[in-house]
Amino acid sequence: MRISCAHKGLAHIEVEELFPDVTWKADNLALVDCDLEYLEHVLEFIGSVRLVFEPLGEVPSTNIESVLEAVDKIDFKYLEGVPMRVKVFKIGVVDVDWKSEALERAAGSRIFSKLENPKIDLKHPEEVVAIVVWSGGIAVSRFVREIKASTITKRAPKNLPNSKGGAMKQTIAKLMVNSHRMKPGDYVLDPFCGHGGLLYEMVEAGYTPIGIELDSRIVGQAVENMNYLGYRDRIHLIHGDALSPPLRRGVIEYVVTDPPYALQTTTSGRTVEEIILQWLGTFTDKVVISMATPNESLKELPDRWITLKTSTDYVHKGLTRRMRLITNG
Ligand SMILES: C[S@@+](CC[C@H](N)C(=O)[O-])C[C@H]1O[C@@H](n2cnc3c(N)ncnc32)[C@H](O)[C@@H]1O
């Protein structure tokens, strides 16, 4: 799987959480071992994957002859009568002494000669034999799917009826939700939900989101956004205070949130850190929290809390924000 590396740390956390068996061939290329049904399911909501290939055979060296030998050994019966082409996918910076078109032509004619009813279609192929090349390796593969970033960005704040400058990018919202996996249907809480960016990605991942927002004007705007996206029946939205959440104990085992910044009026002059510490103190039962904090704040967690994973690689509202996955053990 070719990963978008715009938010590399979070992307790696997501892939490793969603797939049990991952080998990183390059920073943006993951080899995962899972059954097809599970793959299809995860591809419905994963945020970092852009291209999916099914390896047919790894090649011992990147020279053209080795690739052609590997092609010779692969059973391409599934291509009988199917319009196809060969395409090279270079992942990152690779050092090879051949031109992609030359390899595509040579491999294409090998496959052509192996089939009884070959059909080449360079413009609109139904099947693509992908020669995936990365620094240090090469594999002949079946191209499975491209996942466009636009499937996520259609829910971006700028594309919704209401947003404000500070709402986080939708891709980051998705990666944060996917940084810890729960069961489909489980309740997941965003206690500082604002206009609801994280709640939408919880819906997409198959959870039942609960959002809490203190500001009644923002609650109304979030409802408008949810109606616009057709999510209103799938999200529970509470006008209330995260510091005294009106929820039964033990219902929530996973929280994803982007807490307020110091400059917001709703924080009543307290620092972000004071608010977050007070809020963490409201959890008596075990919970896992995926949250974004300004890089400099909350250097130490209160007693009982531990960091499971952390990533510092993205910028939000002009600040580097740190994503942490923490638990109270
Ligand atoms: C950084 S924003 C969240 C942005 C959100 N992820 C989005 O997509 O719009 C933090 C939100 O927390 C709200 N807030 C601040 N204090 C709160 C509290 N004690 N309880 C609930 N919400 C609070 C603010 O009004 C603000 O909308």
Image: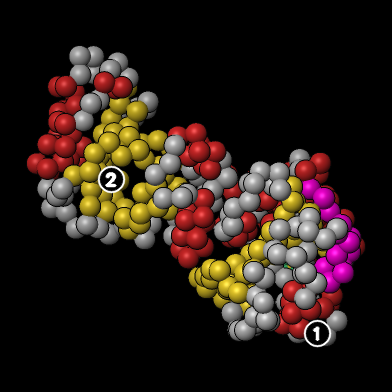
Answer few, some or many: residues within 10 Å of disc 2's Cα (few below 14, many 20 plus, some between 14 and 19). Answer: many
**Left or right of 224: which side holds 46?**
left
Q: Is residue 71 magenta?
A: no
Q: Is label 2 in a helix, a strand or a loop?
A: strand
Q: For the residue marked with disc 2, what is the amino acid?
A: Val
Query: What is the chief secondary structure element of the magenta stretch?
Result: loop
For the question of whether residue 247 can be seen, the reply is: yes
Q: Measuring 65% from the left and 80% from the top, which residue is drawn there?
A: 301
Residue 74: give x, y in percent of width and height.
21, 30
Q: For the residue marked with disc 1, what is the amino acid?
A: Arg
Are the residues tagged 2 and 1 within 8 Å (C-beta)? Answer: no
Depth check, front residue: 72 or 104: 72
- Give the magenta range: 235-247
Q: Is residue 157 above or below residue 274?
A: above
Name the quarter showing ligand 1.
bottom right
Q: Which quarter of the rendering shows the C terminus?
A: bottom right
Q: Measuring 32% from the left and 35% from the top, which residue is drawn there?
A: 142
Q: Measuring 85% from the left and 65% from the top, which residue is drawn there?
A: 245
Q: Earlier in the sequence, mark 2 or mark 1?
A: 2
Query: On residue 270, which mark appears?
Result: 1
Q: Disc 2 designates what residue?
A: 132
Quadrant of the rendered structure where residue 45 is? top right
For the question of whether residue 150 can be seen, the reply is: no
Residue 97: give x, y in percent of width and height.
13, 53
